[in-house]
């Protein structure tokens, strides 16, 4: 597909799949997504900073282990790095789903939950596809804010569950 239609179709299919993922996460994990969305709304700066610190720490740790060659000599460390990466990707995915919910709630307040998620997902995906600003500015911001909100929601949820 030399005419450029292939990449456009791939991006469109990827966007549809991401929106479906966000809808499914909201359907199967409504309390987790809601708790994360509330934290992202309540403390946006704190959520972003917590996400940024965690991303920098995990990337630095992975680079240090990779650069030292220790991960290649100790098989268990490769498994640990893989598990940490999978957990990080999962947390970012839940964070992005909550940011989609937050955007949908703010942009489409009079619609139902599913149209809000679809609309919020479409807006965030299109914003992240904006050359340069979306790729290197908006997407990292939304992902890190969502990650931080997920971690804050996880912590506050554990404290709330223990308290009552």
Image (cartoon, rainbow, N blue to C red):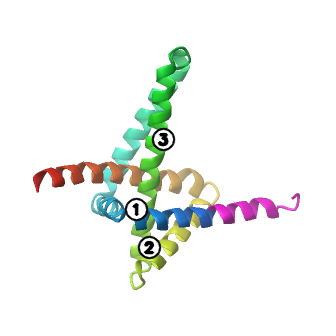
**Which image quarter holds the N terminus?**
bottom right
Position in image of residue 49 (x %, y %): 35, 46
Q: Gap in Å between the C-alphas at discs 2 and 1?
A: 10 Å
143 and 29: which one is in front? 29
Q: Which residues are magenta?
A: 1-14
Q: Left or right: where does residue 20 sit relative to residue 141?
A: right
Q: Left or right: where does residue 156 sit relative to residue 12?
A: left
Say above or below: 22 vs 86. below
Main SS of the magenta part reads: helix
SS for dot 3: helix
SS for dot 2: helix
Instruction: Identify the mark at residue 159; answer none if there is no mark.
Output: none
Q: Left or right: where does residue 49 sit relative to residue 11?
A: left
Instruction: Identify the mark at residue 86; answer none if there is no mark.
Output: 3
Extreme-bottom residue of the structure: 110
Residue at 17%, 55% (x, y): give it: 160
- Quadrant of the image occupied by residue 111: bottom left
In the picture of the structure, the residue carrying the numbered disc 1 is 98
Position in image of residue 68 (x %, y %): 52, 16
Which is closer to the viewer, label 2 or label 3?
3
Residue at 40%, 54% (x, y): give it: 146
N-terminal label among 2 and 1: 1
Residue 109 visible? The answer is: yes
Residue 99 visible? The answer is: no
Residue at 68%, 66% (x, y): give it: 12
Residue at 39%, 75% (x, y): give it: 106
Extreme-right residue of the structure: 2
Q: Gap in Å between the C-alphas at discs 2 and 3?
A: 27 Å
In the picture of the structure, the residue carrying the numbered disc 2 is 104
């Amino acid at each position: 597909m030399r005419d450029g239609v292939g990449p456009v179709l791939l991006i469109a299919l990827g966007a549809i799949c991401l929106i479906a993922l966000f809808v499914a996460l909201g359907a199967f994990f409504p309390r987790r997504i809601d708790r994360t969305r509330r934290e992202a709304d309540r403390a946006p700066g704190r959520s972003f900073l917590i996400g940024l610190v965690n991303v920098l720490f995990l990337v630095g740790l992975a680079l240090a282990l990779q650069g030292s060659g220790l991960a290649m000599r100790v098989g268990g460390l490769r498994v640990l790095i893989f598990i940490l990466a999978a957990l990080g990707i999962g947390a970012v995915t839940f964070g992005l789903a909550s940011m989609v919910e937050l955007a949908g709630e703010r942009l489409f307040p009079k619609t139902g939950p599913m149209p809000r998620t679809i609309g919020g997902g479409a807006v965030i995906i299109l914003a992240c596809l904006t050359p340069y600003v979306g790729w290197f500015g908006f997407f990292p911001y939304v992902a890190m804010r969502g990650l931080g909100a997920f971690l804050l929601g996880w912590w506050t949820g554990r404290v709330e569950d223990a308290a009552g």
